[in-house]
Image (cartoon, helix red, strand yellow):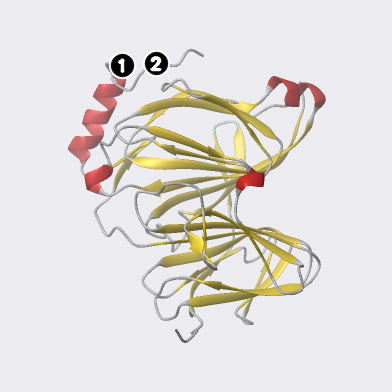
């Protein structure tokens, strides 16, 4: 198949927003970009200096329904607990992939040991929509460790791409997905280039956590400036050049193209379904998780 570069659709910064006591970056949704279907929210939190006197990112038990909340941890250590009985420590480089489906209650925050010793915490919280037919599927939890992810390197071995979900260069991620999606994390050394294949029909984006990267020899991604680009459906490849040590997130997915109704932690198709989700949570139908 002939390789054709996707053209760039949007370029945007990563504006800061307040989420309770937490201040974080939110490129999706932001001005001009409601979502990158099927990805409906992207939060970049940290790096926070965590200590016993400063621990803002400790999220107690809360519900979800109708989508998949995903945490990609880049620095630090977090404890995940949920109403299915799962309890796991997510370390830097790991990914936790929760399928909320008909409902789940979970909690996450730095482990006590990490808080006591102190350190930096940084991650991505990603919301992946579920199609109507899967919104009430049984809840599920997947935890993939960094060392178990398939790895792809460029020829100069200056860039490492890890396949979290989906496929790249005939290597498949271990995450079981409900719709066709690719989730890749990328670490670069000072310089280097890489090509990444993306299906033409996928919505897609590159997000820069830190560093200096040029995409398609056209757009420069830097902290505090343009940090995310999205692409049109007119090619099957993107390429980037690292000009400094950098960290990237690359996402693509087949659009669901269904109406979305969101209220707080619920993502459904109609307002009636939102009301039902609120009622079911209040009635304890999403399970129980002690504080």
| Image point (51%, 65%), residue name | 205
* Image-quadrant location for residue 150: bottom right
Image point (49%, 61%), residue name = 167
Residue at the outermost top position: 290
Quadrant location of the N terminus in the rendered image: bottom left
- Residue 48's place in the image compared with 149, above or below, is above
Q: Which mark is residue 41?
A: none
Q: Is residue 180 visible?
A: yes
Badge 2 element? loop
Q: Position of residue 69 (x, y in %)?
A: 45, 40
Determine whether label 2 and label 1 are within 8 Å by CB. Answer: yes
Q: What secondary structure is marked by label 1? A: loop
- Dot 1, how many residues are within 10 Å of its Cα: few (below 14), some (14-19), or many (20+)? few
In the image, residue 50 lies at what x, y percent? Answer: 74, 31
Foreground: 134 or 283? Answer: 134
Which residue lies under the disc numbered 2? 288
Residue 44's place in the image compared with 63, above or below, is below
The residue lying furthest to the front in this view is: 170
Classify 13 as above or below 29: below
- The crowding category of the residue bearing disc 2, from other C-alpha atoms within 10 Å (few below 14, some 14 to 19, many at least 20), is some
Q: How many marks?
A: 2
- In the image, is 183 to the left or to the right of 209? left
Q: Whole-percent x and y of residue 253? A: 41, 61
Left or right side of 145 for 66: left
Query: Is residue 53 shown to the viewer in this render?
Result: no
Look at mark 1 in the image and give the residue it sits on. Answer: 284
Quote the CA–CA distance across marks 2 and 1: 7 Å
């Amino acid at each position: 198949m002939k390789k054709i570069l996707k053209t760039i659709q949007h370029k945007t910064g990563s504006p800061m927003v307040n989420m309770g006591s937490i201040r974080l970056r939110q490129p999706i949704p932001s001005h001009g970009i409601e979502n990158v279907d099927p990805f409906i929210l992207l939060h970049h939190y940290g790096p926070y200096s965590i200590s016993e006197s400063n621990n803002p990112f400790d999220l107690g038990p809360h519900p979800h329904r109708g989508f998949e909340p995903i945490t990609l941890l880049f620095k630090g250590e977090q404890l995940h607990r949920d109403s299915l009985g799962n309890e796991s420590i997510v370390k830097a480089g790991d990914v936790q992939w929760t399928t909320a489906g008909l409902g789940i209650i979970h909690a996450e925050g730095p482990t006590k040991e990490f808080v006591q010793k102190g350190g930096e915490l940084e991650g991505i919280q990603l919301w992946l929509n579920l199609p109507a037919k899967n919104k009430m599927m049984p809840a599920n939890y997947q935890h993939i460790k960094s060392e178990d992810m398939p790895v792809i390197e460029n020829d100069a071995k200056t860039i490492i791409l890890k396949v979290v979900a989906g496929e790249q260069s005939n290597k498949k991620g271990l995450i079981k997905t409900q719709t066709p999606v690719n989730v890749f994390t990328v670490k670069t050394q000072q310089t280097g280039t890489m090509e990444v294949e993306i299906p033409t029909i996928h919505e897609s984006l590159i997000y820069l956590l830190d560093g200096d990267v040029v995409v398609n020899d056209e757009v420069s991604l830097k902290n505090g400036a343009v940090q995310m680009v999205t692409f049109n459906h007119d090619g099957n490849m993107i390429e980037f050049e690292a000009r400094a040590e950098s960290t990237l997130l690359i996402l693509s997915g087949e659009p669901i193209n269904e109406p979305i109704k969101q209220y707080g932690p619920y993502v459904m198709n109609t307002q009636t379904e939102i009301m039902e989700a609120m009622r079911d949570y209040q009635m304890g139908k999403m399970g129980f998780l002690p504080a």
